[in-house]
Each structure stands twice: as C-alpha cells, then as structure tokens.
Amino acid sequence: MLRPSLSTFAILCLGASLGACASSRLDAPRTRAPQAALDAVPAIPSGTVTAAPLAPPPGVAASPDAPPPPGPQASLSPATPTVIAEPVTPPAPPPPVVSTGRASVVGSWDARDATGANCKVTLSSAPALDLYKASAAACPNKDLAKVSAWDFRDGEVYLYQPGGSVAARLRQGGGGLEGALTKSGAALALNR
C-alpha cells in the first residue's frame, strides 16, 4: 500500500481548512441597504447624447476627407464642405542606384594612366583560383599590360600580374575606378 508523503498530507489539510472557512462565510446572512439610504441619493439629470469624431492626436494631420473637429469654429448645421485645391508637385525622382561590390566592376573598362595612354582592361567573373580572371589589351604601360587576375577586397579592386604581384589598386569613385599603379605610384583611372 502506498503511503502519502508529508507534503501531500499538508496540502490536503490546508485544502480542508480553507473549504471550511469558505463554507462558513457563505452561510452568513445577507443584509440589504435600507430603502431610505437608496432614496437619499440624488438623481443625476440625463441630457442628450451627441456623437462626433475625435480630433487627431497632436502631430498627426487629419484626413482630408474627414469632417472638421467639433468646436467653436464648427457649425452644428450641415454645410457643404469647401475644398481648397493645392498645386500638386510630382515627387522628386529617387537618386540613381550606384552599385558597389565585386559584381559592379565586372566588365570592360577603358584604362588611362598618368601619361594619358589608353587601353582596354576586362574584369571577368570567371574564377581563377582565389581570384578572378582579367586581361589587358594594347596597354603601353608594361605593368598594366601583364594584368591576368583581379579581386575585390575591403572596397578596393586589386589588379594582379602572373605570380601574384599587385599591379594596381583602385577604388570606386566618380562613376569609375580611380587609383594608382603599385610600382610607379602613377595615377590610373578605369572608366566604362
């Protein structure tokens, strides 16, 4: 046979004592307030109830088709609302989206070095080990002519020569890429 634990016994005793208290409280006779006390309360006059829309909270404009809030300026008689037409100005076009990142620099570029010489540099999305393939065509600058790979790190475009040496570092700016050749420090700009 199972023996109840001490905590189970305590809970049962507590429940029985509360039940006894509750039943004695409910058996008490109820009294009503004397009628004289109820008659002594003055009646509150009743008036007419009107309904009106609430004014908008502070800082929020009211809806243009909402009726005016009640107040000294509002008339209780129905009236034709007066509509004041304001000139409509079209919203300003959003600023152009300037894409940044690796995908935004993929493609053909016109390269111009500090001497003013031009050539074509193509940045491909085809992977080449840890970098991406690149090529240069008709570049008079020997360092730029050897470009074979590129990468985009920390907001900069790195152009690499075979063997992994950095030929140039460029940042996006002014609608193109601007930077310098690594060995000479001469300015280099790539534009579409």
Image: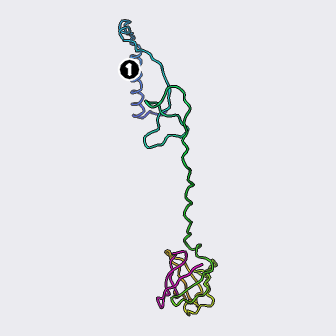
- Quadrant of the rendering where the C terminus is positioned: bottom right
Residue at the image point whose x is 47% and y is 38% from the top: 56
Which image quadrant is residue 73 in?
top left
The amino acid pointed to by label 1 is Cys
34 w.r.t. 111: above or below: above
167 w.r.t. 46: above or below: below
86 w.r.t. 173: above or below: above
Residue neighbourhood size for the residue with mark 1, other residues' Cα within 10 Å, grouped as few (<14), some (14–19), many (≥20): few
Magenta stretch, residue numbers? 167-192
SS for dot 1: helix
Residue at the image point whose x is 54% and y is 91% from the top: 143
**Percent coordinates x, y for residue 99 in the rendering:** 56, 69
Q: How many marks?
A: 1
97 w.r.t. 89: above or below: below
Residue at the image point whose x is 38% and y is 8% from the top: 39
Q: Which residue is mark 1?
A: 21
Q: Main secondary structure of the magenta part?
A: strand
189 within the magenta span: yes
**Percent coordinates x, y for residue 157 in the rendering:** 53, 79
